[in-house]
Image (cartoon, rainbow, N blue to C red):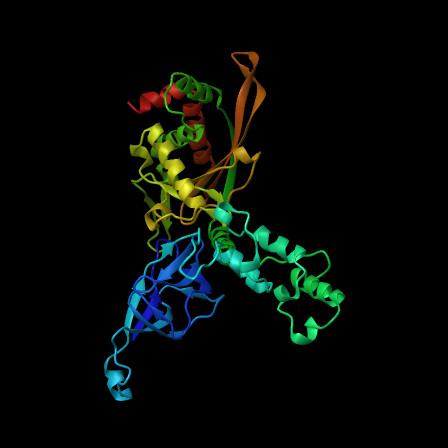
Amino acid sequence: MVEVKLHDVGEGMTEGEITEYLVKVGDQVKVDQPLVEVQTDKVSAELPSPVAGTVKEILAKVGDVVTVGTTVIILEKEGASVSKTKDHSSKEKEEPISFSMKIDKSQSKRQSGRILATPYTRRIALENSVDIEQVSGTGPAGRVTDEDVFRFMKEESTPATLKLSDKKSEQAPVDVAEKREEVSSPTSGEKTIPYRGRRKQIGKKMTHSLMTIPHVTHFDEVDVTNVMKLRDELKAEGIKPVSVAAFYIKALVFALKEYPVFNAVLNEEKEEIVLKSDYNIGLATDTEEGLIVPVVKGADRLSITAINDEMKRVMNLAKDNKLSKKELTGGTFTVSNVGPLGSTGATPIINHPEVALIAFHKTKKMPAVVNDEIVIRQMMNMSMSFDHRVADGATAVAFTSRFAELIENPTKMMLEMM
């Protein structure tokens, strides 16, 4: 027998929720065949079979949250004798095998012809007695979204989708409508969304961070007129377009080198603050299934153009839920660029176990005094949350002031790179 256990899939990902089994007891499986779908706080994933054989037992239920090392499925390896005596079987102890996740949000159609849908969407359909095979998808490549399921629940009126009993099926249409109201709305005018999967994992992580770290948020503003002008001039000269956020990240790296306490981790057990030598910048990214933080590794060694390219690459992978373990772990400082969404301010929660997180908010033209004259400048709000156990407010102000100096005078930043 092969005891299949949840594998340690990376830093901070110590557990996952079982969202769907792709096999049942008695099924024959091949090596690398997907067995079960799991949702962690970062990704949706498929767990493949480590061997060819037969599914003998399924030990965890759909909806269970299992920790790393938990046995979820027992397989009988292909070729194993089924006629062994009980005593003989006990001598050949079950072999524990762990396996890694294959990340796949797109949920491409398998040999079984399953439609495109994320595990979270399938969960919503399951808990509302909706046959997801009957739902028309409006997402990319025809994928069924959460909204598609809710719309189906509201519009579809066939008794089959409600899975009514024979007795209920014989009742008048008005009873069917009443039943549908019970499914889609526990009370009049209300709907429920399951608090499971990534949403639940994000909630647990945020709660842990807020309860563990004494947060302080420092607010400031920075004049981004010159750096935006520089970006536009480079673009006009035919140089590859670069997001202004890439300039921000490069300026942050320089500021972090001068104030390394914000590129650190507090080790309470050893009573020491570990100043990190790597500058790995996490990018808080909004996706259909919730917040995820891909990491730009070695930002101190990358040019602004290279930072821009890497930002786009990992953020696109995040939105498609195709990030690897390497791209999800190792962050030392996190950036949240919410300005394009229209945000004017926030008190962001730190990405534990990091020490700080900075959020860039909306940029807008405002009157400002420059050389005793009132001029129109492009001003950006920013907020920085930091661990007050590790740093004080004065240090945070000095850090953001240094960042602002580099952004307001981008030629100084160019000189720093020489």
Residue depicted at x 24% and y 86%: 88
Q: Examine the image and state in which quarter residue 80 appears.
A: bottom left
Q: Tell how many labels.
A: 0
Which quadrant of the rendered structure holds the N terminus? bottom left
Looking at the picture, how far across and down is residue 269, in whole percent? 35, 56
State which quadrant residue 40 falls in: bottom left
Q: Name the residue nearer the viewer: 268 or 47.
A: 47
Closer to the camera in the image, 243 or 227: 243
| Coordinates of residue 181 in the picture (x, y in percent) | 70, 62
Q: Is residue 339 left or right of residue 163?
A: left
Inspect this view and state whether residue 353 appears: yes
Q: Position of residue 397 (x, y in %)?
A: 46, 32
Looking at the picture, tell me which residue is in the foreground, 122 or 394.
122
Up the image or down, 383 lies above or below 146; here it is: above
What is the x, y in percent for residue 326? Answer: 32, 48
Above/below status of 11 relative to 98: above
Residue 282 in view of the camera: no
Quarter of the image for the C terminus: give it: top left
Residue at 23 percent across and 83 percent down: it is 91
Describe residue 238's horizontal placement relative to residue 289 as left or right: left
